[in-house]
Amino acid sequence: MSILSWLFCVLVTILIGHYGRGSGQDEEAKVKVSAAKNVFILGGQSNMAGRGGVRDGKWDGNVPPECKSNPLISRFNAQLQWAEAREPLHADIDVGKTCGVGPGMAFANEAVRARIGEVGLVPCAIGGTRISNWTRGSPLYNNLVRRATESVKDGSGTIRALVWYQGESDTVREEDAVAYKANFQRFILDLRSDLRIPSLLIIQVALASGEGKFTEKVREAQLGIKLSNVKCVDAKGLQLKEDKLHLTTASEVHLGIKLARAYLSH
Ligand SMILES: *[C@@H]1O[C@H](CO)[C@@H](O)[C@H](O)[C@H]1NC(C)=O
């Protein structure tokens, strides 16, 4: 063998070894990731976005132990990237308001504590929105569908449920409260169809408060949803802030844990 062909052989061996091994490792890493992330879409209005610890337009920065960051918990940010999850979870999403503690981090921590593995949160809630703001084709609806779709596009996870807390703004006008049940059911069916997850689990919250006098009417609608795979967690009786509308940090933690248990018992 000439020295040139010997050199050639050595080079080829090195290259095959390098690239062959490299792609094998990538494949392995991908499989590990795809088995991992349990993705939850968070939707609704202010009590989902989180106002716990917010006073006079400022958040007090208090993060209870149940809401701490954890390497197993990530959030899908406004730039459509997975990043470390930390309070306030909706800070770059519900940008029109000051965000504080919501139920999301307590939910995720409780799920991790139950050893479900990695948790990915996709925050989408916007304060002050009525159910009519979330009809198919509306900007909020389209954004939620887009964020949900993008969050699992790389195959890194599976959407497990939509966690929904909304309706306070539908308690002001009687016609909104009366139409709530039909509108919410329509929203669920449209979303399942557009995400192509026909039996997507919905975990919704029955209101603890309202902006108007038809809170009981909206609660009745929420508690009376008869679609399959829709679970309801009742927030009635949870302590509210002085505004009588928003949950305190402690209440948000309590609710987040209840929502996680509803998921885990599903
Ligand atoms: C919700 O709907 C109302 C009435 O159509 C509209 O004025 C408001 O801007 C909407 N809010 C959002 C956040 O889209």
Image (cartoon, rainbow, N blue to C red):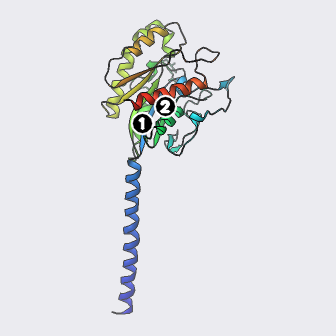
Residue to which mark 1 is pinned: 148
Residue type indicated by callout 2: Cys
For residue 124, which numbered disc appears in the image? 2
Pick the residue in front: 124 or 132.
124
Which quarter shows the N terminus? Answer: bottom left
Pick the residue in front: 244 or 64.
64
Tell me if 165 is positioned left or right of 202 in this view. right
Residue beneath the point at 60% across and 22% down: 248
Tell which circle, 2 or 1, labels the residue nearer the N-terminal end. 2
Residue type indicated by callout 1: Ala
Residue beneath the point at 39% across and 29% down: 265
Q: How many marks?
A: 2
Q: In the picture shown, does residue 175 fall above or below 17? A: above
For residue 114, which numbered disc appears in the image? none
Question: Do residues under tags 2 and 1 come within 8 Å of each other at their CB atoms?
Answer: yes
Residue beneath the point at 42% across and 27% down: 262
Q: Is residue 219 visible?
A: yes
Q: In the picture shown, does residue 197 fall above or below 17? A: above
Pick the residue in front: 67 or 44.
67
Q: In the picture shown, does residue 210 fall above or below 41? A: above
Alpha carbon separation for disc pair 2 and 1: 9 Å
Label 2: state its secondary structure. loop
Tell me if 65 is positioned left or right of 149 in this view. right
Q: Residues within 10 Å of mark 1 (few under 14, many from 20)?
A: many
Q: Quadrant of residue 68?
A: top right
Tell me if 199 is positioned left or right of 86 in this view. left
Question: For the residue with label 1, is its CB less than 8 Å from the closest atom of ligand 1?
Answer: no
Instruction: Where is residue 108? Give x, y as percent.
Output: 49, 36
Label 1: state its secondary structure. helix
Find the residue positioned furthest to the front. Answer: 114
Which quarter shows the C terminus? Answer: top left
Q: Residues within 10 Å of mark 2 (few under 14, many from 20)?
A: many
